[in-house]
Amino acid sequence: MSGFRDRLNRWMYGRYGSDQLNRFIMVVTVVCLFLSVLTRFTLFYWLSVVGIILMYFRLLSRNITRRSAENTKYLRMTAGIRGAFARFNNRRKDKTHCYFKCPSCRQTVRVPKGKGRISITCPKCRTEFIKKT
């Protein structure tokens, strides 16, 4: 099996490979394929075919600078959405702190859990507000 892996690695040498944009295209392609099976609507089928072709084109491309620029542009466009999901996941996993928004400037303030009713001072605008942790 390692002989096949070595041949594949040699063949892929100098090619772009996979990145976040390819993963996004793959998810959209699978969703379109699933919708085409459910609805029998041929537009979803052809969108999935185009997605597969585009995914393999990017995967096997030797123009690394252009593919990297496409991925960077995609990452810049989706930075806000990805950041919001990352903040949500971090807050969900944080078992020792509560997060509150300042009522005047909307700054997020992190305070320890289990302290009861406390007075919180916003570090940005110095507004005080009382919350239960």
Image (cartoon, rainbow, N blue to C red):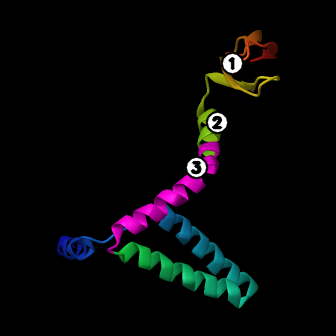
Q: Amino acid at mark 3?
A: Ala
Mark 3 and mark 1: Cα distance apart in space: 24 Å
SS under mark 1: loop
Residue 18 makes an appearance in the image = no
Percent position of residue 79, x then y: 58, 49
Q: Amino acid at mark 1?
A: Lys
**Point 64% across, 50% down: residue:** 81
Task: Give left or right: position of 68 versus 102.
Answer: left
Which quadrant does the C terminus fall into?
A: top right
Q: Which residue is mark 3?
A: 79
Q: Amino acid at mark 2?
A: Arg
Mark 3 and mark 2: Cα distance apart in space: 20 Å
Which of the two residues, 95 or 71, is positioned nearer the viewer here? 71
For residue 77, above or below residue 100: below
User: Residue 92: which numbered mark, if any?
Assistant: 2
Q: Which residue is mark 1?
A: 124
Instruction: Give the main secondary structure, helix, strand or loop, of the magenta stretch.
Output: helix
Percent position of residue 110, x then y: 66, 22
Crowding at dot 1, Cα within 10 Å, few <14 / some 14-19 / many 20+, comes out as few
**Point 27% across, 73% down: residue:** 12
Task: Give left or right: position of 46 versus 38.
Answer: left
Crowding at dot 2, Cα within 10 Å, few <14 / some 14-19 / many 20+, comes out as few
Which quadrant does the N terminus fall into?
A: bottom left
Which of the two residues, 27 or 114, is positioned nearer the viewer here? 27
User: Residue 83: which numbered mark, if any?
Assistant: none
Magenta span of residues: 62-84
